Image: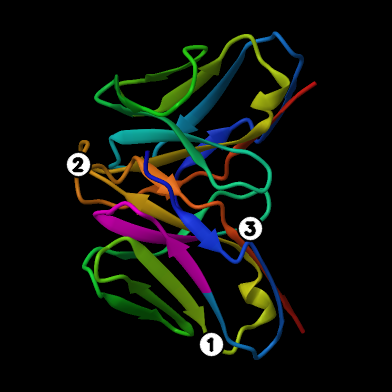
Amino acid sequence: ETGVTQSPTHLIKTRGQQVTLRCSSQSGHNTVSWYQQALGQGPQFIFQYYREEENGRGNFPPRFSGLQFPNYSSELNVNALELDDSALYLCASYKGGPGADTEAFFGQGTRLTVV
Amino acid sequence: TQLLEQSPQFLSIQEGENLTVYCNSSSVFSSLQWYRQEPGEGPVLLVTVVTGGEVKKLKRLTFQFGDARKDSSLHITAAQPGDTGLYLCAGGGSSYGKLTFGQGTILTVHP
């Protein structure tokens, strides 16, 4: 059991709507990364948060945004949803700041369907 | 842009057979991780290799990191139905949180 929990587990939204996904990091972990995994593909890095600030971003548009809170939990927000945003969204947490030599542990993911 | 290519994409074998999954890149990674993912679940870390030429064994699974730290392989001996799943390799750069994943290998082991 990794200790990383995500909510909700499943979500259906309409194109154009906004969505917020949540992640509670494993105890002792202060860094959170978010990934998008389309069906049949490997996860794609969205961004990473450390000390409540974005630290590194993948090739995703600005309508993908996030937050990290003092307790290290995190949110992923997606505005103006598109059909292609349908995917499994994964949160991973690890201990240490960017560059730290630690291993990431993943949550079970949130399955987002945009119709 | 760092890319990782996994092969094969699909593997369907009988129980007891051996198999190897490959993960290749033109880029150097500071570490290489292997994950196993069940449908509807998040990836679960199997192993991390960090030294060129490193070999790690986990029961029937053997992981190798290439000498130049650009490629890796996962070998499973005497596969069992419980090994069925999606196997992902992921390269780490300056931060373990920023992983570059391969597209995955879907392994099915038939009883």
Q: Is residue B34 magenta?
A: yes
B50 up-or-down from A104: above or below:
below
Tag of residue B77: 1
Residue B60 x, y percent position in the rendering? 49, 85
Query: Which class describes the residues within 10 Å of circle 1: few (<14), some (14-19), or many (20+)?
Result: some
- The kind of residue on which mark 2 rests is Gly
Chain to which mark 1 belongs: B
Tag of residue B87: none
Residue hosting label 3: B38
- The kind of residue on which mark 3 rests is Glu
For marks 1 and 3, give the CA distance. Answer: 20 Å
| Number of disc labels | 3
Query: Which class describes the residues within 10 Å of circle 2: few (<14), some (14-19), or many (20+)?
Result: few
- The kind of residue on which mark 1 rests is Thr
Q: Is residue B3 magenta?
A: no
**Magenta stretch secondary structure, dominant:** strand
